[in-house]
Image: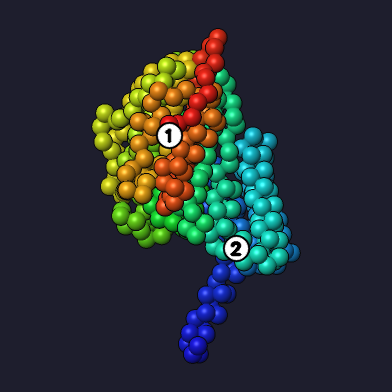
């Protein structure tokens, strides 16, 4: 390696080692420069995770402590320390800091596989995609993230569930691209969704907030519309209404599985572009569908619908699930994952995120079954 290449490598390593401090500084600046309803928690959480594979255990610990102190100090400064969001955000950063210490320990033990960029990226994604509660009110919930084969990079599939004053709100999406940049975008989408879901009165308003967040992210990374978009479907289940509202932004259509084994495809009445295309705010219109007792809403990414068998035949979840009954959302996802593996011969080439929400059938229980 020549002197010029060596100098460039030294500069790159120096910059990488500065990244945790830069993320914390960026979080402080962002929080102080924006209204209180915006949060810089993803930036603080990223600091110890970035430090984990490149710093010592003590250095990672210092990065985690700095992130925790930064979040705590901002809440004292903003006089929001007594609010529930302060506890939630602090708990998130503490949890991620603990995960970073675990990652650092594993890397230091010399496990080459766990030290790979894929495993670290997956650990980050798991940190920003916590499993939802299995029950929210009368609804039963199950979520699953299924990575592709061992040597594939982590993708940008995402899901989130939020219990809000307007009902239970859901999002499933797929960020274009792979690796750490995709995971970072996932954090942006999830953070924006959780804020918007609590504050926006309409599902269309939530979609508009996600659009603006992704457009800002595209500007920050200097991405064009072909690089920075995210397909997503948002859903809202108001309490006691027996309906589900859906906004679909270029994503595979959700399925509605009925108590009698029937399957409905929730096609949008109007096609819409993915989020973050940079073409202005899309005039979203939520479609309303019935959600009767015993029905289960299934949202998924294209890793499911584009899974192929040895002959190149795509997996058709609507056809494969028709006529089958399941005890609940968890059993549905177990059967679905097993069936996809049989269809592909365990040779899937894309990650998939699955989210199922069921409304119990009062007075009776569905009979568990498996896909054909």
Quick check: 101 above or below 340?
below
State the residue lying farthest toward the left. 270
Mark pair 2, 1: CA separation: 32 Å
State the residue lying farthest toward the right. 58
SS class of the residue under badge 2? loop
Occupied quadrant, residue 26: bottom right
State the residue lying farthest toward the bottom. 2
* Lateral position of residue 284 relative to residue 340, left or right: left
Residue 94, image x and y in percent? 68, 48
> Which residue occupies the foreground of this view, 89 or 143?
143
> Which residue occupies the foreground of this view, 283 or 315?
315
- Name the front one of labels 2 and 1: 2
Residue marked by disc 1: 299
Residue 103, image x and y in percent? 66, 58
Quick check: 284 above or below 310?
above
- Residue at (32% x, 41% y) in the render: 250
Q: Count of labels shown?
A: 2
- Residue at (41% x, 20% y) in the render: 261
Q: Earlier in the sequence, mark 2 or mark 1?
A: 2
- Residue at (55% x, 72% y) in the render: 15
Residue 51, image x and y in percent? 63, 63
Residue 150, image x and y in percent? 52, 56
- Return the mark for residue 267: none
- Return the mark for residue 113: 2
Number of other residues with Cα within 10 Å of mark 1, as a class: few under 14, some 14 to 19, many 20 or more: many
Q: Is residue 83 visible?
A: yes
């Amino acid at each position: 390696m020549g002197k010029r290449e060596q100098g460039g490598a030294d500069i790159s390593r120096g910059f990488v080692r500065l990244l945790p401090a830069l993320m914390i500084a960026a979080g402080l600046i962002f929080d102080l420069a924006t209204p209180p309803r915006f949060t810089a928690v993803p930036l603080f959480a990223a600091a110890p995770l970035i430090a984990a594979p490149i710093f010592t255990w003590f250095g990672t610990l210092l990065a985690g402590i700095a992130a925790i102190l930064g979040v705590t100090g901002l809440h004292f400064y903003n006089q929001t320390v007594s609010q529930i969001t302060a506890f939630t955000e602090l708990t998130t950063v503490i949890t991620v800091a603990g995960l970073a210490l675990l990652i650092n320990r594993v890397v230091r033990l010399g496990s080459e596989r766990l030290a790979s960029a894929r495993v670290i990226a997956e650990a980050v994604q798991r940190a920003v995609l916590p499993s939802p509660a299995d029950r929210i009110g009368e609804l039963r919930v199950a979520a699953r993230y299924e990575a592709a084969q061992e040597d594939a990079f982590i993708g940008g599939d995402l899901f989130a569930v939020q219990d809000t004053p307007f009902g239970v709100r859901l999002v499933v999406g797929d960020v274009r691209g792979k690796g750490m940049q995709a995971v970072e975008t996932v954090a942006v989408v999830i953070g924006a969704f959780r804020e918007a879901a609590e504050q926006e009165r309409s599902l269309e308003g939530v979609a508009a907030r996600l659009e603006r967040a992704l457009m800002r992210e595209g500007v920050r990374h200097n991405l064009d519309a072909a690089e920075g978009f995210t397909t997503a479907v948002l859903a809202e289940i108001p309490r006691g209404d027996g309906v589900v509202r859906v906004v679909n932004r270029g994503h595979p259509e959700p399925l509605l599985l009925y108590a009698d084994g029937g399957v409905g495809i929730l096609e949008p009445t109007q096609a819409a572009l993915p989020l973050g295309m940079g073409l202005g705010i899309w005039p979203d219109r939520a479609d309303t569908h019935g959600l009767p007792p015993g029905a289960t809403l299934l949202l998924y990414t294209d890793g499911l619908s584009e899974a192929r068998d040895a002959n190149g035949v795509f997996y058709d979840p609507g056809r494969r699930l028709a006529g089958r009954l399941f005890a609940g959302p968890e059993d549905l996802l177990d059967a679905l994952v097993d069936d996809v593996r049989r269809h592909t011969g365990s040779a899937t080439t894309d990650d998939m995120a699955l989210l199922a929400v069921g409304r119990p059938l009062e007075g009776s229980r569905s009979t568990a079954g498996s896909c054909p």
